[in-house]
């Protein structure tokens, strides 16, 4: 009882960090439920991942099959459905990632599992699992409970916690693939790499980042002027890229780039978790936003709560004066 | 190509102060402005582009109250042919799997090639209804899609992955696709379209009309429970600069220059 299973996520020759984050959380939960931490790895010739997972798990179940060379949610669903029915975990954790959100809801429907998506933390009260999630883009938290019987299923938000040290030495058990044949109705074709732009923002020392608060394309010269005096490159949140103000190569966040500049000025960015994950490694963060509750302020070193259109022109002017 | 597009009406809380209401399980939404969910707006546009390229019709589906009609009519004004709104307070909107069951009941048995949804609702952030809906309908799916290329009996999509990489996937039709923001440039509804939209069919249905047993999609049978909402403690180490806007700008400039940040 109380066993916590974690689906290992990997892509293009890389074990994804969210896997170790989940195993770290799973160890904390299993420590309270008295269960084991079990990593489930579906892949082809990825023995090195299996070994690494052992450092964070009590057991590693490894299906080594060419059918799992590339991710395909339909194949994963079939395999996991069979494994969950066989091993009956208390909790199955899948990353709240582009792989996980493509998989978990359908799996939950198929097996009629109690399912909570985008969990950021799991409390254990009287032996019962109480997932925590967020509403309204981080402005409200919600305590959830499962009803009915396990197995329970969650997707777990990436970058919610720091990965611990490998403290376990779980053995790797190669198991037979529950998937006996390929899936015909959904086919993986290829990966297409990100566009390369004129500036590599992952190498920038100073970044001026814009978000929804900048409102319109015609306001961008205001930002460009500031960036010029700061000798900064310009990047943005998803909203700025979706609106077409900047190219995709300038997007900061989980679906864009992860940046670590010396200075990051977030202008009109509320700070969705996907954005924060991409920029919280910056050495110094300045946030300018008129909403005092904007999550961006949780990562900021300096904050200005005000109308950016009143602050930015003066900031540019003063910087010109000080640096001129 | 016959398309269903699912839409949700959500509050814009991006710059709003959110307060938990007296029930502890909801928020005071009296001061919010509401509109179509951002990703759903892109899904509507994608449906229109596909209809324009391939012919066929677009039906809008929404679970919501009468307040959603303005938003639904806008989607019709952009070229949607008809709409179904499922208006029933017994639907447990907290549970994405139950919402998916309701939407599936509205679509099941009808002819369709594609169902499009937004990949995420900005209020609950579940990212779950579209993929669950596919399973309910028994058709393949792809989530977080930034490009759709419809073929004959198949559809090729680009899924947006972490780090700007895309995964190209091909599926047999019919299928469900959850649309990521930025896939297209949502149009504004033309004036003529807005006038025409008033005359288009918008059916308002109850669970009973769909043959859904209310208890199957109600809170009592949900396998998850929302216990309470709370406002998270903001652990901010930020030094908040005070003053008039221009004073703040001057202080920040001095901090950056004298602090050696620039």
Image: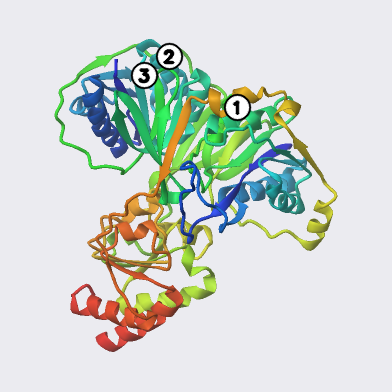
Instruction: Name the outermost residue toward the front.
Output: B22
Residue at screen point 51% across, 47% down: B123
| Residue at disc 3, secondary structure | loop
Neighbour tally class for label 2: few under 14, some 14-19, many 20 plus, Cα within 10 Å: some
User: Residue A115, percent across and down?
Assistant: 45, 28
Residue assigned mark 2 = A82
Q: Distance between the residues labelled 3 and 1?
A: 39 Å
- Of tags 2 and 3, which is closer to the observer? 2
Q: Distance between the residues labelled 2 and 1?
A: 26 Å
Q: In which quarter of the image is residue A155?
A: top left
Residue assigned mark 1 = B217
Q: Can residue A104 be seen in this view?
A: no
Residue assigned mark 3 = A65
Relative vertical location of residue B161 with respect to residue A178 in this rendering, above or below: below
Relative vertical location of residue B222 with respect to residue B202 in this rendering, above or below: above
- Label 2 with label 3: CB-CB less than 8 Å: no
Q: How far apart are marks 2 and 3 (CA)?
A: 15 Å
Q: Which of B233 and A223 is in front in this view?
A: B233
- Does label 3 lie on the same chain as label 2? yes
Q: Nearer the viewer, residue A251 or A123?
A: A123
User: Residue A233, percent across and down?
Assistant: 35, 69
Q: Which of A319 and B7 is in front in this view?
A: B7
Residue at screen point 15% across, 25% down: A168
Display colour scheme: rainbow
| Residue at disc 2, secondary structure | helix
Q: Mark 3 lies on which chain?
A: A
| Residue at disc 1, secondary structure | helix
Relative vertical location of residue B145 with respect to residue A74 in this rendering, above or below: below
């Amino acid at each position: 009882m109380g066993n916590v299973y974690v689906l290992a996520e990997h892509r293009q020759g890389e074990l994804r960090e969210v896997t170790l984050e989940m195993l770290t959380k799973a160890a904390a939960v299993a420590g309270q439920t008295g269960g084991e931490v079990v990593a489930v790895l579906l892949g082809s010739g990825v023995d090195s991942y299996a070994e690494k997972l052992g450092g964070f798990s009590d057991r590693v179940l490894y299906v080594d099959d060419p059918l799992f060379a590339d991710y395909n949610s339909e194949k994963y669903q079939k395999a996991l459905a069979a494994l969950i029915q066989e091993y009956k975990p208390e909790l199955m954790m899948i990353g709240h990632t582009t792989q996980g959100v493509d998989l978990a809801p359908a799996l939950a429907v198929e097996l009629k599992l109690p399912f909570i998506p985008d969990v950021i933390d799991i409390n254990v009260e009287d032996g019962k699992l109480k997932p925590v999630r967020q509403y309204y883009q981080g402005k409200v938290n919600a305590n959830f409970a499962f009803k009915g019987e396990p197995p329970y299923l969650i997707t777990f938000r990436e970058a919610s916690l720091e990965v611990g040290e490998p403290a376990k030495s779980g053995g790797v058990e190669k198991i037979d693939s529950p998937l006996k044949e390929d899936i015909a109705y959904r086919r993986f074709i290829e990966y297409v790499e990100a566009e390369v732009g004129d500036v590599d923002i992952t190498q920038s020392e100073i970044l001026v980042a814009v978000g929804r608060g900048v409102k319109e394309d015609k306001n961008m010269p205001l930002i460009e002027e500031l960036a010029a005096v700061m000798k900064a490159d310009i990047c943005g949140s998803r909203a700025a890229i979706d609106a077409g103000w900047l190219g995709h190569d300038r997007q900061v966040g989980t679906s864009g780039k992860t940046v670590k500049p010396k200075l990051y000025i977030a202008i009109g960015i509320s700070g969705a978790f996907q954005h924060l994950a991409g920029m919280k490694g910056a050495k110094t963060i300045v946030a300018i936003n008129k909403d005092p509750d904007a999550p961006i302020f949780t990562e900021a070193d300096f904050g200005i709560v005000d109308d950016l259109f009143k602050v930015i022109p003066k900031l540019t002017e003063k910087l010109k004066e000080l640096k001129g | 190509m016959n398309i269903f597009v699912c839409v949700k009406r959500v509050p814009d809380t991006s710059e709003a102060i959110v307060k938990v209401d007296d029930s502890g399980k909801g928020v005071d939404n009296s001061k919010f402005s509401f509109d179509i969910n951002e990703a759903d707006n892109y899904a509507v546009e994608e449906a229109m582009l596909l209809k324009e390229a391939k012919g066929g019709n677009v039906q809008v589906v929404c679970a919501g109250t009468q307040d959603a009609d303005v938003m639904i009519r806008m989607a019709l004004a952009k070229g949607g042919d008809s709409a179904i709104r499922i208006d029933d307070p017994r639907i447990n909107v907290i549970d994405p799997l139950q919402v998916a069951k309701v939407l599936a009941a509205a679509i099941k048995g009808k002819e369709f090639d594609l169902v499009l949804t937004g990949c995420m609702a900005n209020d609950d952030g579940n990212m779950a209804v579209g993929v669950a809906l596919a399973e309910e309908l028994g058709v393949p799916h792809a989530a977080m899609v930034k490009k759709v290329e419809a073929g004959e009996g198949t559809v090729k999509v680009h899924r947006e992955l972490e780090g700007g990489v895309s995964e190209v996937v091909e599926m047999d039709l019919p299928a469900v696709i959850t649309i990521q923001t930025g896939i297209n440039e949502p149009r504004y509804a033309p004036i003529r379209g807005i006038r025409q939209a008033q005359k288009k069919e918008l059916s308002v249905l109850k669970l009973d009309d769909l043959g859904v047993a209310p208890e199957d999609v109600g809170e009592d049978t949900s396998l998850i429970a929302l216990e309470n909402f709370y406002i998270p403690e903001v652990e901010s180490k930020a030094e908040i600069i005070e003053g008039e806007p221009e004073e703040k700008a001057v202080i920040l400039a001095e901090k950056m220059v004298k602090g050696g940040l620039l």
